[in-house]
Amino acid sequence: MTAIDAAIRWHAGDFHLDVALGAGPGVTVLFGPSGSGKSLTLRAVAGLLTPSEGRIAVDGRVVFDSARGLDLPAHARGIGYAGQRPALFPHLSVGGNVAFGIRAGSRADRARTAAAWLARLELPGFEHRRPGSLSGGQAQRVALARALAPGHRVLLLDEPFSALDESLRQGLRQLLADLVQERELAIIFVTHDLREAHLLADQLVVIDRGRVLQAGPRDGVFRAPRHRRVAELLGGTNILAGRVVARAAASLTVSIDGWEAVAASWHGDPQPGDAVDIVIRPERVVIRRGEPAATNTLPARVRREFDYGTNHTLEFEPLGPGPSLLVDLPSRPYDVLGIAAKKDWVLELPPGDVHVMPAAPPFRATTQ
């Protein structure tokens, strides 16, 4: 069942938000650059911002409908919400903040529930402390506990880990995964961190300039973007201009800088002669020692490299016709292959990882 079903419009000055969004059980990540409309969308669903027009339903119950004049307040929508800022009540204790939204049970029951959530968020014994005594990361976790404590099935989280160090982030990501399984939670999670989006998302919604550019299962969106702008936002650094040479039932042959490659993934209806954009993610390029040639092999030389500790990014230039490519490689394979001592290699682009999109002009705010 779809937990959130929203189609809304809102504008302020030159910014126009026009978003249709559906989210079911699991984690739906709203991903995009700062200022793209992610947080505005979340606030509208939560009842903290009133759209100019549209409709929002939560678990099948309509909570906003501009045509009917219906706009339920935030506390009546049955949603847990944690924003970018903790926004804790300064006059209440930490325990009182967490228990604030719990409606069922006695005062003692609510206090026990609050204490249990604080312990689960690695804040045991914090019930009697005041918000002013907390660090930024502690306050953020208290806000998350407050959103979780009432037991709502729908949870909206707006960059809730931004003030936390990586070790805490890892623990809380696992907590969210556990809660999805335990309670069949539907979580909408806002981030502009590409790594976090990939780690958390079951479904990925890419937003830019107030529009949803693409939505679907995470891996499908990452590996098969609809057009260049989506590929750019998702870190597809190998985005190449080319032209379709031939089309078969399950593949395309494309020409890129005088080099021909076979692609087994595409969006739209590319035909021979069409100008296209081609993307292959840098972590999907295979570095070969020079074994017998396979499909889509390109002799190339390392021109520059960047060492990030856990992985290396290598910039290759072709030794003949073909494109320059970036390749991401974990540190262990980098060492085993001996790349630091050898500069000439053969790159292989598996056809299933070569994705073709219609060639598009630079993105405009009106692009759908």
Image: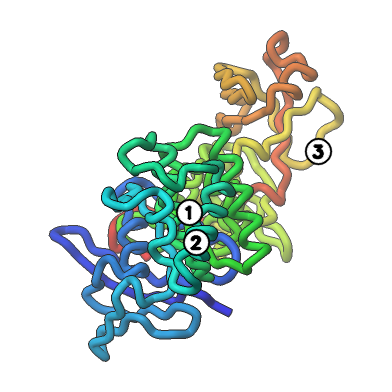
Colour style of the rendered protein structure: rainbow
User: Disc 1 versus disc 2: distance between alpha carbons?
Assistant: 6 Å
Q: Is residue 179 left or right of residue 190?
A: right
Q: Earlier in the sequence, mark 2 or mark 3?
A: 2
Front position in the image: 11 or 329: 11
Badge 2 element? loop
Residue 44, horizontal then vertical, whole percent: 31, 68
In the image, what residue occupies the spot 62% across and 69% down? Answer: 184
Does residue 188 appear in the picture of this structure? no
Q: Is residue 40 left or right of residue 316?
A: left
Q: Residue furthest top?
A: 341
User: Disc 1 versus disc 3: distance between alpha carbons?
Assistant: 53 Å
In the image, what residue occupies the spot 68% across and 11% down? Answer: 340
Residue behind mark 3: 294
Residue behind mark 2: 149
As displayed, is residue 163 above or below residue 72? Answer: above
Does residue 76 appear in the picture of this structure? yes
Task: Tell me the kind of residue under disc 3.
Answer: Ala
Residue behind mark 1: 145
User: Disc 2 versus disc 3: distance between alpha carbons?
Assistant: 56 Å
Picture quadrant where residue 146 is located: bottom left
In the image, what residue occupies the spot 56% across and 57% down? Answer: 221
Q: Residue furthest left?
A: 13
Q: Residues within 10 Å of mark 2 (few under 14, many from 20)?
A: many
Badge 1 element? helix
Q: Earlier in the sequence, mark 1 or mark 3?
A: 1
Q: Quadrant of the C terminus?
A: bottom left
